[in-house]
Amino acid sequence: MLAYNSATVTNPPTTLDGLVSWIEAHPGKFAYCNPADGGSGAYFVENVLDSKMPASAVQTLAFNDDTALESDWKPGMSLLHQLNADVYGNGTYPTGNTQVLSLLGSGAVQMATVWSDQGTQALQDGQLPSTVKLVDISPAFPGSPVYLGVPKYTPPHQVTLVDAFLNFVLSVPQQAKIVKKVAGFPAIAVTLMTPTVKSEFTPLGEAESLPYSANIGSDMNKAWQEEVP
Amino acid sequence: MMSDAPTLTAPARSTHSNPPALGRRPGRRGIAGPRGGRVALLALLPVAFLAVFGGIPVVLSLLLVLGHTGGPNQAVSELGQNEIAGRGLGTLGAITQVLRDKVFQQSVVATVVVLLVTSMVVLGGGLAITVWHRLRPSRPTALLQFLAVIPLFVPVVIASFALWTFWGDRGAADSAAQLAGVSHALVFSGTLKGVVIAEVWVSLPFAVLLLRSGIAAVSDSSLDAARDVGAGTLRTARQIVLPQLRRECLVVFCFTAVGVLGSFTVPYIIGPSSPLLLGVDAATTFTSYNEPQQSAVIGFAIFALAAVVGCVYAVGSRSRRVAAR
């Protein structure tokens, strides 16, 4: 998510293009971490790369290791390289999610990309001042889905137990707990959730951004290191 | 010239020779027979340990570097990506690929520069602290020497993070600079200068301890004699003390260099995103780029640089032995 200091940023950007313009207009006030070291930076980079790629390519790279499509990263990477001069410290990328939170908390930067759960936790702990707000932009940053997997060879008499457990996890009260305790996104449709969750999540829309497959993500980290800083 | 309590009649230059042989008459052989065999076996244990847990992985890594992705390397090859496999004796493809990589080349240059600067600063700083205290002992110099050893007791991760905060934006150093009106003058986090500062902080205690023990061997009588003929502190330091510290200086320089070569935590936390140091580059290549073969190549590059430092140490020690004969 995008975290910004509402005390100094009165008009936060709501789109990716708006964010890029904001970064260029306010040099040194935005930070994202090295994508190799933290997901918050990685998903910012992915969002920028995806915005310059055909949607079909993005879809393919989410599930396949089609390295030929990596050439579509060129426009996104060159934009990120251009932004070097405008990000924090003239192109200093914090090593990890925690350092970004530190910079935001100390006021060294006014805006940064952070994890939704880590950011919410930091706000609750007081590591981030209460003036910091977390928002989504459009297109939304890719996130990390959390998967529950069931092995194919589960014996039939245990499948009923597994199903019962999955139904429990997917039930509305449990999904509401996920939203409340770990600041996660519900896995079921927002229209089925409790009124408080509905009011919080309906404005964000149902748009999902898929993260890259693991190997493509690794290639992205390497390409970033070679082309951006 | 007033002198202190009469000095001991210790030899002017203490010998670092072996202790006198106890209970051994000339002509007697060393431990032989069954007892000797058992002693040799005991000495072999650490060697065997090193060979199995250090040597075998190194050999397997070398095979991976040369493109042998089967056998013991099969698991890591299946999980990794961008591997260059070879048949027969192997291939140098992985090595050439890494050597041509721009990020790697920058890392090598950055690492060598940082290690040279760090070693010189550590040696210079360590000598300054210990020699000054030896020649002109006082409470402040004793305190300085004590403070210089404290970093030894602080875990490196904690120290790195603390230094990153201290030398960062809005850190203590930057805040002081802003009060003086020069904002951003003292922000070193995220730069190679910051890495040097942190590496010096981490390496200085060992240097001070080693130099302190070496300097204790310099006899008081030689220092008194120098003072008697009117030599100043700097002159005494340069002509009496420093020549006797040659071995310790060599050890400090080489160990600091090797320490910086293999360091990961300090440059990871406080260093820039580009250029990286070799330790960080190797680890990131393995963890974040999922390229175990290429990270093994970088590992061997670190070995090669360490071997160069080792050669410097060997040559430096040898010439001293030659001179002593």
Image (cartoon, rainbow, N blue to C red):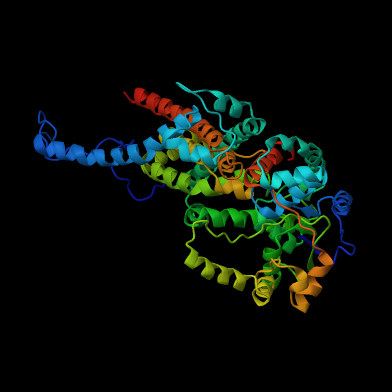
Question: Residue A100, how many percent across, how many down?
Answer: 70, 57
**Which residue extends farthest top?**
B88
Residue B192 or residue B41, whichever sits in front: B41
Q: Quadrant of residue B277?
A: top right
The location of residue A172, given as percent across then percent down, is 68, 75
The image quarter containing residue A134 is bottom right
Q: Position of residue B177 (x, y in %)?
A: 75, 55
Whether residue B21 sits left or right of residue A229 in the image: it is left
Q: Nearer the viewer, residue B171 or B148?
A: B171
- Left or right of B31 on screen, residue B68: right
Residue at the (50%, 57%) spot, across then down: B154
- Above or below: residue B253 compared with residue A165: above
B16 with respect to A1 (left or right): left
Q: Which residue is more in the foreground, A171 or B276?
A: A171
Tell me if I can see residue B166 in this picture.
Answer: no
Tag count: 0
Q: Nearer the viewer, residue B260 or A211?
A: A211
Quarter of the figure that contains the N terminus of chain B: top left
Q: Is residue B287 visible?
A: yes
The quadrant of the image that shows the C terminus of chain B is top left
Picture coordinates of residue A68, whole percent (x, y): 71, 34
Tell me the residue at 50%/32% (across/down). Answer: B300
